[in-house]
Amino acid sequence: MTTGSYRPRNPGHDYYGRGVYLVTLVVRERLPLLGSLDNAALHLSPLGEEVLRAWEQIPVRQEAHGNRVVVHASVCMPDHFHGVIEVLDPMQWSLGDILQAFKAHCTKVWQERQGLLSSSLRPISVAGDNMPSWLLEKTAAHPTEGSLVRNLSKIQRQEYYALVGRDQRPLFDDSYDDTVCLDERHRAAMIAYVRDNPRRALLRRRLPDFMQRCLHILVGDRSYGAFGNLFLLRWANKVQVYCHRRHPATGEPYEITADYASQRDEWIAAVLGGGTVIVTPGISRGEMITKNECLEKGYPLIHLQKEPIGRYWKPERRRFEACANGSLLILAPWNLDQMQPVAGVPPESDYSRFHNLNAIAAELCTFSGSAKVVE
C-alpha cells in the first residue's frame, strides 16, 4: 500500500513533448505558509498571493527560454499548491525543469520576505559540531565566504537542509506529483478539481465523521485504506452486489437479463426498507449500474476499489459528494495484487482482482462491530 505524498511519475511518458498536466507541490513539512482555512473560506497569505502570481508568469518566463506553455488553473491551499499547465510545443526543457524553475523562484521570494539571500547566492553555514566531513572541507576551503548552496550536489543539499533551520530550506518539497491529461474531458475534470479544492477542504473540515481518511484500518483480520463514513461498517445489514459479465446459462450480458432485474429489485427494496448497506467493487457492468444508482440517489454504499488510498489521496467529485452526504465508505484492501491467483490467473490481472474484491465484499457482509483504526 502506497502511503507517500507522491505517485510515481508516468514511466515512458515524454515530458519534453506536448501535453497537459495537473501538478501538485507540497510545502516542506506541510507548514501552512500559503494561507489559512477557517469554517467559511480560504484566506491566502501574502506569500500565497505571490506564489499564484509566479504561476501566472510561467508562460512569459518560459518564452524567454524558447518554451511555449500556458497555465489553465491554479489554487494555493495552506500547505500545498495545485496547477494545470499545458505544453504547446516540444521543448528542450522537460516539465520537471519548468517546475523546478517555478519552485526556485517561489523559494527566492519566500526567503527575500524573511530578509535572507536566495539559496543560489547564500553561503552554506551550519552552527554546532554536527557538520559532515564534506561540509567541513568546503567551509575550510572558503573560510571567508563559504561555499554557495547552489554548488552542492542534490544529496549534499538534502543533508545540508537537514542540519539548518526551516527558513533556510526550499519552500516546497523536492519532488512533485503530476497527472497526465488523457483527453478533453479529463482536462475539464482537472480544471474543475483545482477550482473546487477550497470547497472540498471546507467540507472535510465541517464533516470530519463523513470524511475520515485512514491509511490503515483493520476490519476483521484484513487491512484497508479507507475514506468516508466508517460508521457504515457497523450497520446491521449489508448486501453484496455481485454480477458476472455474462449470464452463466444464456451468455447474455448479465445486466440485461431478467435475473439481474429481479436481483436489483431485491437490493433496492432492502436499502429502502432501512438499515441496509450495499457492498460492491462495482467492476462488472451490472455492479457498476447499481453502484452508480447508489451514488446518484444517496443510498448507503461501501465501495471496494483496487487503487490504494494514500496520505493525500482524494476521491473524484461524485464519490466525494457522496462522502459529504454520509452515504459512502471507500475501502482499498492492502496487498490486493499479492492475493492468491484465481483459476491459475495471476493476482495482478483484472480477472483475479474482480474475484478477489468480490470475495472481500462477501467477507464484509458478515462483519459486525467497529473497524480498528491503526493509522
Image (spheres, rainbow, N blue to C red):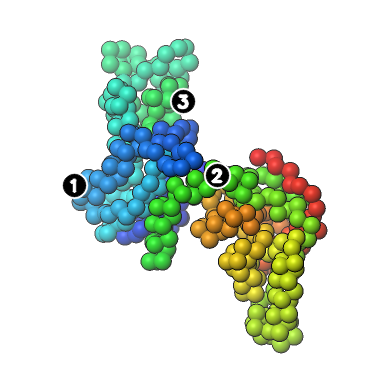
- 99 or 328: which is nearer to us? 328
Instruction: Please name which of the two marks, 2 or 3, marks the residue nearer to the observer.
Output: 2
Above or below 167: residue 247: below
Q: Nearer the viewer, residue 106 or 344?
A: 106
The answer to whether one can see residue 272 in this image is yes
Relative side of 328 to 35, left or right: right
Residue 206 disc label = 2
Q: Position of residue 198 (x, y in %)?
A: 44, 47
Q: Residue 363, labelled with which disc?
A: none
N-terminal of the pair, mark 2 or mark 3, is: 3
Q: Is residue 284 above or below residue 79?
A: below
Q: Secondary structure at mark 1?
A: loop
Q: Residues within 10 Å of mark 1 (few under 14, many from 20)?
A: few
Disc 1 marks a residue whose amino acid type is Ala
Decide if residue 369 is on the left or right side of residue 297: right
The residue that mark 1 highlights is 64
Q: Position of residue 44 (x, y in %)?
A: 37, 38
Whether label 3 touches label 1, CB < 8 Å? no
Asked if 323 appears above or below 239 in the picture, the reply is above
Disc 3, SS: helix
> For residue 162, which numbered disc appears in the image?
3
Whole-angstrom CA distance, mark 3 to mark 1, is 34 Å
Report, in whole angstroms, how far the alpha carbon at label 2 lies from the one at label 1.
45 Å
Looking at the image, which residue is at 58% across and 46% down?
207
Amino acid bearing label 3: Ala
SS for callout 2? helix
C-alpha span from label 2 to label 3: 36 Å
**Which quadrant of the structure image shows residue 189?**
bottom left
Name the residue: 51% across, 57% down: 316
